[in-house]
Structures are given as structure tokens and as C-alpha cells.
Image (cartoon, rainbow, N blue to C red):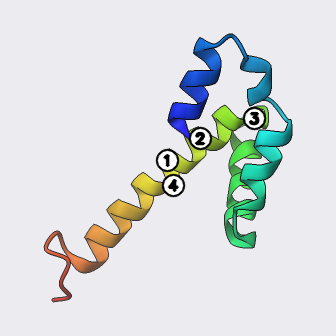
Amino acid sequence: MEMAVFTLKEAGRSEELQDGTLYTTLLKKLSDRMMVDYMRWIADKSVTESVESLTRWALTESEYRVISAERREGLSGSSP
């Protein structure tokens, strides 16, 4: 997703990063739980829905999931 954002910006097509076909297509790929979490994040951060905000949310979510897994399972990946 980050590469698509970068490429569209570099090509001067930033309008495609707003609430359009690409954004709608990406949202359809989210599970119900992820969609709720994303909508809550949008509201909490008071940001506009866009491909860029979805990308930021996805990166943040993945960081939290890695941290959570490391704490739960330890850095080695095995249970104590």
C-alpha cells in the first residue's frame, strides 16, 4: 500500500488517494473486526478517510500486533 501511495503522489494523482475506487476496494479486504477498529481509529484521530489514513492505520496496527505477540510468546516465539 505504501508503494501505491508513493507512486500515485509522484505521478501527481493524489486525488486517487481520497475516498474513491481504490479506497473502497481496500476497505472491502478488511474483516469486520478490522473495519470497526479502523473506523474507531479514524474517529479518535479525527483524520479524513483516505488510502493514506488506511495505510497509517495498517502500519500502526501491525506494529501493535508484533509487540503483542512478542510479549505473549517471548522474543523467541515459544511459549514459556
Q: Give the residue drawn at x 56%, y 41%.
A: 1
Q: Give the residue drawn at x 66%, y 43%.
A: 54
Query: Percent from the top left, x then y, of residue 42?
Result: 73, 43
Asked if the residue under mark 1 is in contact with the one under mark 4, i.e. CB atoms within 8 Å, the reply is yes
Q: Quadrant of residue 72?
A: bottom left
Badge 4 element: helix
Q: CA distance from mark 1 to mark 3?
A: 15 Å
Asked if the residue under mark 2 is in contact with the one under mark 3, i.e. CB atoms within 8 Å, the reply is no
Of residues 60 and 7, the one drawn nearer to the viewer in this rendering = 7
Q: Quadrant of residue 37?
A: bottom right
Answer with left or right where residue 51 lies relative to residue 1: right
Q: Give the residue drawn at x 51%, y 54%.
A: 61
Image vertical order of residue 16 relative to residue 63, above or below:
above
Q: Which residue is mark 4?
A: 61
Q: CA distance from mark 1 to mark 2?
A: 9 Å
Q: Which residue is mark 3?
A: 50
Image vertical order of residue 10 relative to residue 40, above or below:
above
In this rendering, does residue 39 appear at all? no
Q: Amino acid at mark 4?
A: Glu
Q: Which residue is mark 1?
A: 60
